[in-house]
């Protein structure tokens, strides 16, 4: 890893711990959003899917660092992109679990890959009340 990457990673970590989140979020977006969005698009997602996954990864990454669970064994880039990749893979796995046979066809009106309404109970997939 180059020295500039290490000092930049250290600045990001220090900013998260000092609650300078606006600047850190901007920096993380500038550095990693393109990679995350490109990964999602390459793996059967849309631009919107990529932006949504990036935001979810951003929250998860900040929480990981603030909780003290980030060990620093990998670079921030590797960690951040891995979080985003895992979010996307889990989302894909969950979608396939909702679709009989695991088949999924993305329609133009479906911006996120969300499960369809549950026909057996009459409840939507997002309605968790009993």
Image (tube, rainbow, N blue to C red):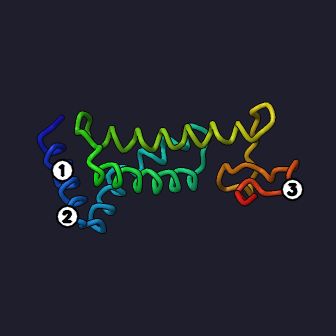
Within 10 Å of disc 1 (Cα), the crowding (few <14, some 14-19, many 20+) is: few
Give the distance between the C-alpha atoms of the residues marked 3 and 2, in whole angstroms: 47 Å
Q: Earlier in the sequence, mark 3 or mark 2?
A: 2
- Residue 80 in the image: state x and y as whole percent: 36, 44
Res. 81 mark = none
Foreground residue among 18 and 39: 18
- The mark lying in front, picked from 3 and 2, is 3
> Residue placed at 24% from the left, 34% from the top?
73
The answer to whether 3 appears left or right of 45 in the picture is left
Image quadrant for the N terminus?
top left
Q: Is residue 71 left or right of residue 116?
A: left
Residue that label 2 marks:
18
Provide the secondary structure element on which disc 1 rests: helix
- Is 105 placed left or right of 53 in the picture? right
Determine which residue is flagged by label 3: 122
**Residue found at x 17% / y 55%:** 11
Q: Residue at x 16, y 50 (%)?
A: 10
> What residue would you read off at disc 1?
8
Of the two numbered discs 1 and 2 on the same chain, state the one appearing first in sequence.
1
Q: Residue at x 25, y 66 (%)?
A: 19
**Residue 123 image position (x, y, % from top left):** 81, 57
Q: Position of residue 130 (x, y in %)?
A: 76, 58
101 displayed left or right of 5: right
């Amino acid at each position: 890893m180059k020295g500039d990457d290490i000092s930049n990673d250290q600045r990001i970590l220090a900013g998260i711990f000092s609650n300078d989140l606006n600047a850190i979020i901007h920096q993380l977006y500038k550095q990693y959003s393109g990679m995350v969005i490109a990964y999602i698009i390459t793996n059967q997602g849309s631009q919107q899917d990529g932006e949504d996954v990036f935001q979810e990864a951003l929250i998860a990454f900040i929480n990981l660092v603030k909780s003290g669970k980030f060990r620093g064994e990998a670079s921030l880039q590797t960690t951040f992109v891995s979080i985003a990749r895992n979010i996307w893979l889990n989302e894909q796995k969950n979608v396939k679990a909702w679709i009989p046979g695991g088949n999924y066809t993305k329609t133009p009106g479906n911006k996120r890959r969300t499960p369809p309404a549950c026909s057996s109970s009459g409840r939507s997939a997002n309605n968790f009340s009993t």
